[in-house]
Amino acid sequence: MADWDVEMKDVTTEDRSATASICKVLWTPSVSSTSSCAMSVLPGPSSGSSICPVSRSPSAGGFYSHHAEHRTFSILYVPDPSREKNRCPGSNLAWIIRNIKRSQYAQVQHLSNVCFIAAKQLKEMEKDEVRVEITEWLWTMLCISEHMNHNQKSFDLSYMSWNDFKATICSPEENMSQWNFLLSRDCIIGGLDYTIGTRCASNIIVSVLNSSYFYSPQDGNNYDLEGHAFDSFERNIKLLRTEVHIWPPILQVQMAAAKAQTVAMLDRIAAIHGWMRPSTTLIEDGAPIPIDTVLKRSHSDAGSNVILPPIAVPDHMQDCEERRTNLSRLRTWKELKECTTSSNQSWMSQEYVPTLRQLGEWRFFLVGGKIANVVHTYHDFDTCKWCGEFVTSFYTKNEIRDIWARHGQGELAISEDTFVNPTRGDLALREKGKREVYEFVDIVFRDLAVRENQIHGTRNSISVFCRIDVGLLFDRAGEPWYFVNEIERTTTASLWLRMDKINEQRSMMDTFARVFHSYLTSLFDPHLF
């Protein structure tokens, strides 16, 4: 039975004649015989039922007593349909294999496209466990559902499929029980991710060079929202977020989706600190398109709507000249406009950095502003697979410079893992290397977080969770520079847990639970002291 079919004891309902549409909030006082408190009322269907949203007050009685309490927040998680199994290949990075409790599986088994029993069950599993293939973020939600503080649960997790969520938002009048259930939650996580695009595109360009085809005719709309349905969704989700907190906050995600403002802030941060960074410029409609840069479209999923320059094709790759020709043909406004579905979308030209392909990237996962995990990744063009490993040690910049110089002199071959997890050098040297890159990431995070706080007038979502992708480039003198290539902040961001061959990285999930509870507590507490 779905959660919203169960009688909700924490929701107060009244019989009241419906005089307005469900899509409007009536800011009319609702006076009951037991309380003189005025509440906003959302009118129900023609039967006259309506719902008074749950009070968000952190304490029921006593002056300032809420400061000492630990609250259990009701959370609804809506898995993103772009990560469903029927849309992704088996090797997709969004999926992992984990052992979960059978009681947990019972809660999420109706989400059949994001969790199902694995083909191979292990004999050494506990009797109350089941081995499943599951998306990273659904597993994260199961992890935080177990979080305790002062012997009290931090979260009461519920789960709803995207199709049910979409139907409820688009037609609240026809799905009143589900709509009321949404209103009863403290927070909704997931749903529609504005950073990856919400409209259908005729072609989705792929950036990996693993075939002779550089764009594929597939549906770019993972949400099945077009025309009137999209307008209804947008209108009603704005209403919903006045009553329920949605994380990440929609307005913050929409700004991040445009990319240009984030790029401008990263450029400003680099300029202040004197760091080298690849240049990125907005391409005006109809303007000349550079031949040797990377073209990126805003509002795009990872790897989609990215066009590498012809020089990115290695000489050793089969049919390299044909591939370069194909890439050149994509660099026209006719092709770009075929992949542009909204006036909000724009194309940018980024300076091509060969070392991103040669050396890969370091993915830094920040939870609560602290680095929780680091994963180094690269794309193996020979096997057409993503590879990577968790990072525990770093070279110093001086060491990186010396190794790169030996490579330039032909003394040393460079591979994707050359600068990953050095095993030699004393502890002081390894600590210095770690401190150099950690300080770089911390400076970028702190400066970016403050700037986004100023824009939004509130604490931004990257203070809870974000992934900062860092690359290496070298100036003409051979000096190495760290730079930020991308910043991810939503529940479609890959956590790269498939790279973990040893344990389940529960530490990062448990930290996320603690941080997220603190974040919600601060939102629901209006007092500053």
Image (tube, rainbow, N blue to C red):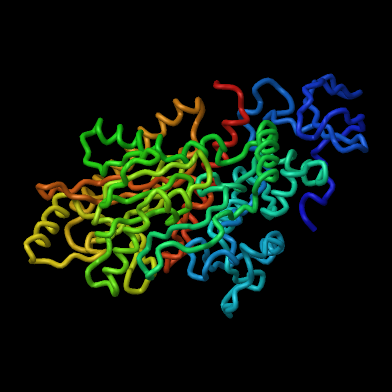
Q: On the rendered structure, is 354 left or right of 200?
A: left
Residue 13 in the image: state x and y as whole percent.
Answer: 86, 35
Q: Nearer the viewer, residue 112 or 66?
A: 112
Residue located at (35% from left, 53% from top): 331
For residue 10, above or below residue 62? below
Quarter holding the C terminus? Answer: top right
Front residue of 315 and 194: 315
Residue drawn where x is 33% and y is 56% of the image: 308
Does residue 23 show up? Answer: yes
On the image, the x and y values in percent for residue 6 come to 82, 50
Image label count: 0
Q: State whether residue 420 appears in this view.
A: no
- Of residues 168 and 231, the one drawn nearer to the viewer in this rendering: 231
Q: For residue 425, what is the image quadrant?
A: bottom left
Task: Specify the quadrant that holds the N terminus.
Answer: bottom right
Residue 50: image quadrant is top right
Where's residue 338, x and y in %? Answer: 48, 52
Q: Is residue 288 left or right of residue 196?
A: left
| Residue depicted at 69% across the width and 64% down the height | 109
Q: Is residue 441 above or below residue 223?
A: above
Q: Is residue 496 left or right of residue 247?
A: left
The one of 59 and 473 positioned closer to us in this rendering: 473
In the image, is 333 to the left or to the right of 115? Answer: left
Q: Pinpoint residue 211: horizontal percent, then vertical percent.
A: 38, 70
